[in-house]
Image (spheres, helix red, strand yellow):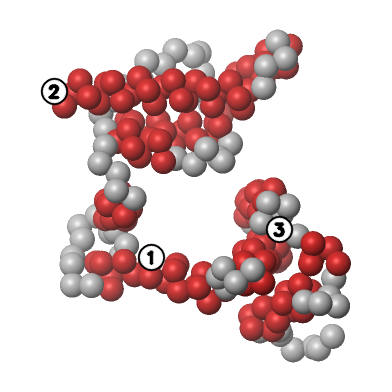
Amino acid sequence: MKTEKYTFEEFLNVIAMLRAPGGCPWDRAQTHQSIKSSVIEEAYELAEAIDSGNPEKIADESGDLLLQVVLHAQIAADAGEYDMSDVADLICRKMIHRHPHVFGSEESETGGAEDWDEIKRKDRQQQTVTDELKAVSKALPALMRAVKIQKKAVKAGYLFQTESVPETTEMELGRQLFSIASKCREEKIDPETALSMYLQKFIEEFEKYETEKEQ
């Protein structure tokens, strides 16, 4: 093993060798589906490293997450679908396209955040806020998905009826969430499934709200 730093190109070559004939049997056997959960796991581990504030841990976990991206690209390359250069090209084009105030002649008073959302809606051909709610990834943890859906709904003028609580500290709200999780366990109800089902119902109700609002 060499003493100087490895380059990104060398990293790509390492993964290609692991997947090549005569390489690692485990790596060669992997598919997009078989390592799908690893992407999520590594993302959470990176998030934990970020919370620790330790630069070395952040760099290490960033590498583990990058490994997942590169491994998926190599699996695709082996199947003749796409490779890492396509991944880089696509994300570069997306970043340039969604930052016209930086790479184009347009000026922005919002610093780009609203521009990004508006261009994203156009790219995805989202005509309504309901379309945006439906587009929030179902692969997200249900609670995280709920917050994203709520933010979009509130931005569109929707008012939520929330129950008053004695305290709104993180600790107290965390206690209430923990209590709900305990109730789900007692009733043998999966909380992720339960919240996902309710989110679907909410989106349907919001669609009616949006339709009536436009009339």
Residue farthest toward the front in the current orientation of the protein: 80
Tell me which residue sits at (39%, 26%) in the image: 203
Left or right relative to 108: residue 1: right
How many residues crowd mark 3 within 10 Å: few (<14), some (14–19), many (20+)? few
Depth check, front residue: 80 or 32: 80
**Sooner in the amino-acid sequence: mark 3 or mark 1:** 3
How many residues crowd mark 2 within 10 Å: few (<14), some (14–19), many (20+)? few
| Amino acid bearing label 2 | Gln
**Sooner in the amino-acid sequence: mark 3 or mark 2:** 3
Q: Secondary structure at mark 2?
A: loop
How many residues crowd mark 1 within 10 Å: few (<14), some (14–19), many (20+)? few
Instruction: Count the labels in the image.
Output: 3
Marks 3,2: beta carbons within 8 A: no
Q: Gap between marks 2 and 1, in whole Å?
A: 35 Å
Q: Is residue 99 above or below residue 145?
A: below
Q: Which residue is mark 3?
A: 31
Q: Quadrant of the C terminus?
A: top left
Percent coordinates x, y for residue 17 in the rendering: 77, 79
Q: Is residue 46 above or below residue 86?
A: above
Q: Gap between marks 3 and 1, in whole Å?
A: 26 Å
